[in-house]
Image (cartoon, rainbow, N blue to C red):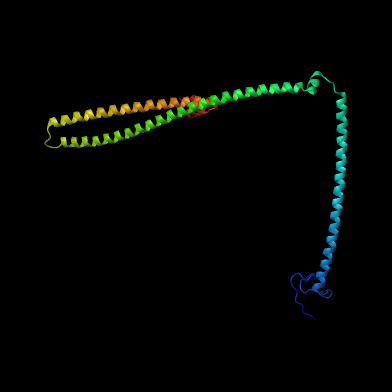
Amino acid sequence: GVLVRLKQGQDEVKPEAVVTDYGGAALLPADLVRQKNAEILAAGGEKVKILNKIKNFRKSINYLQWEKNHLQVRVRDLEEYFTDLQLLRVTKDLQAVLKGDAAETDKKVVERYEAKTRLLTAAHADRARKLQAANARALGQVREREAENERLRAQYDELERSVAVRRSIHRTRADGATAPGATGGTAAAAQAQAAAARMKRITLRRRLIDLARAQTEEIEALRLELDRLRQRTFPSFAHAARTRLAGNPDEEY
């Protein structure tokens, strides 16, 4: 027997379950196999070239056939168009078009509409500028009112702190007045002073609440005016949003 080392894929004999029979196998040189493969590839390449030539030739035949059909269709279309021209009735309007009068009339109509379009565009631009200016003024007023509300809120907080400090001082004095040895006149004076301070705080708080309510109403009026100005240029859904947030009046009870 002869021992031969082969790489995977070089052994083309169908393997058996236990022992493979190599009695009818032939051992060929690798150079001979490569030579035969090269010959097969060359023959296949020539065959592919021939097939490509046949394909291109058939493509050219199909294109010529399509061109022929296209020209025949154009010939029929031109014949029918010529027939329509022969049967066409010449009217005054057609004569005007042929002479060029209709083109002149259409030109005047176009010029008139262009002039009207320019006027409408200018009027729209002027109205848009006025609405934008009014919108800007309304926004400025809203910002001023909001800034003023912020200042009033800061003043209110400062007054609240001042009242808290005065309340603490008054409580300390009241505690000292009720201590042993305090006179009745001192306690009465302290009570009167506390009542006056309380009245002053109540009056000041009421003024601040009224001022804040007035500012809120003025801001709401400005916002309504802003919505009204916006509705002139584009649809606004502010009213519908407020109605939706307010709820269904039929469900209130």
Residue at the (87%, 24%) spot, across then down: 87
Is 150 above or below relative to 66? above
Quick one: 160 or 222, which is closer to the camera? 222
Please state the horizontal and vertical placement of residue 93, each as a whole percent of the image.
79, 20
Please state the horizontal and vertical placement of residue 194, each as a whole percent of the image.
21, 30
Say which quadrant the C terminus sits in: top left
Say which quadrant the N terminus sits in: bottom right
Is 45 above or below relative to 244? below
Residue at the (84%, 54%) spot, across then down: 52
In the rendered view, does 96 fall on the left or right side of 71? left
Quick one: 88 or 2, which is closer to the camera? 88
Is 16 above or below relative to 137? below
Residue 247 visible in rendering: no
Quick one: 185 or 227, which is closer to the camera? 227
Residue 119: quarter of image: top right
Residue 52 visible in rendering: yes
In the rendered view, does 222 fall on the left or right side of 28? left
Residue at the (84%, 65%) spot, across then down: 40
